[in-house]
Image (tube, rainbow, N blue to C red):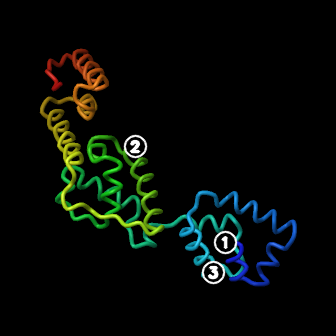
Amino acid sequence: MVFARLRASYGHRFDSTFGDGDSLNIAKREWGFCLQGYSEAQLASALHAAKLKYAWPPAISEFLELMQTNPEDLGLPSARDAYQEACSCRIDPRRFPWRHAIVYEAAKRTEFWRLKTAPEKESWPLFEKNYKELVKKVLDGEDFTVPDSIRLEDNSSVTVALDIEQLAEQNGIDSSLLYYMQKPKHSPIRQQLRQRALKKLSELGIDLVLPD
């Protein structure tokens, strides 16, 4: 599809750039290899952008740059702006006026508690990855909506994150010691992490009864 569209757009300039016979087949194989994993919608968008930007057929490196869709081109906030927005409503997403549904969706996939309690070096890369994947889905025509009310599991996640912060602040301890509370109750991993937290508190000389 890509080479047929390029030929239709550039005519004799396409032939001058790629030649024919063996040289054309080699170019097709190289482009095909480099463009694996991209959707038809992304390819169509890049082909349209190429016509507007280049008088001659673009090199593969130039075409790949066109494949990197900027959220702003779709009327979406940048990944960084979306991250800052998600962090600003990390406690109660139900009452926040989201600028776009995929910001909420990216925050949900990253997990609201992580946006609240984890350091930026941990939460930002994960949010950025989720957001970029969602931008591609929007480009492919997928729609996202913010639910009228956050589902119970989301609300529980937010509530636990708030409990962790409050408990940590009240007792002057690092909130990371309480991350075990995010695990399912009575699960082996939760009990294991709780015991580690108790041991750490004991080493610090802090006598605190932690929730089960």
In the image, residue 105 lies at what x, y percent? 33, 57
User: Which amino acid type corresponds to the residue marked 2 in the rendered image?
Assistant: Lys
Measured from the top left, where is residue 210 in percent x and y? 16, 24
Q: Tell me the SS state at disc 2.
A: helix
Please tell me whether mark 2 or mark 1 is closer to you in this view.
Answer: 1
Residue identified by numbered label 3: 51
Q: Name the residue under label 1.
A: 1
Task: Place residue 166 in its image quadrant.
Answer: top left
Which sits earlier in the primary sequence, circle 2 or circle 1? 1
Label 2 environment density (alpha carbons within 10 Å; few <14, some 14–19, many ≥20): few
In this view, the residue in front, 79 or 169, is 79
Q: In this view, does 172 lie above or below 47?
A: above
Residue to which mark 2 is pinned:
121
Task: Give the spatial CA distance, label 2 vs label 1.
Answer: 40 Å
Split into 4 quadrants, where in the image is the N terminus? bottom right
Q: Is 144 positioned to the left or the right of 44 in the image?
A: left
- Mark 1 burial class by Cα count in 10 Å: few <14, some 14-19, many 20+: few
Cα separation, mark 3 vs mark 1, equals: 15 Å
Q: Where is residue 186 in the image (x, y as percent from the top left)?
A: 23, 25
Q: Which mark is residue 109?
A: none
Q: Of tags 3 and 1, which is closer to the observer?
A: 1
In the picture, measured across the screen, residue 169 lies left or right of residue 187, that is left
Q: What residue type is labelled 3?
A: Lys
The image quarter in which residue 201 lies: top left
**Disc nearer the start of the sequence (3/1):** 1
Instruction: Give left or right: position of 45 versus 95.
Output: right
- CA separation in Å, label 3 and label 2: 39 Å
In this picture, is 68 found above or below 51?
above
Of residues 189 and 168, the one drawn nearer to the viewer in this rendering: 189
Q: What element carries label 1?
A: loop
Residues at circles 3 and 2 in contact by the CB criterion of under 8 Å: no
Of the residues shown, which amino acid type is indicated by label 1? Met
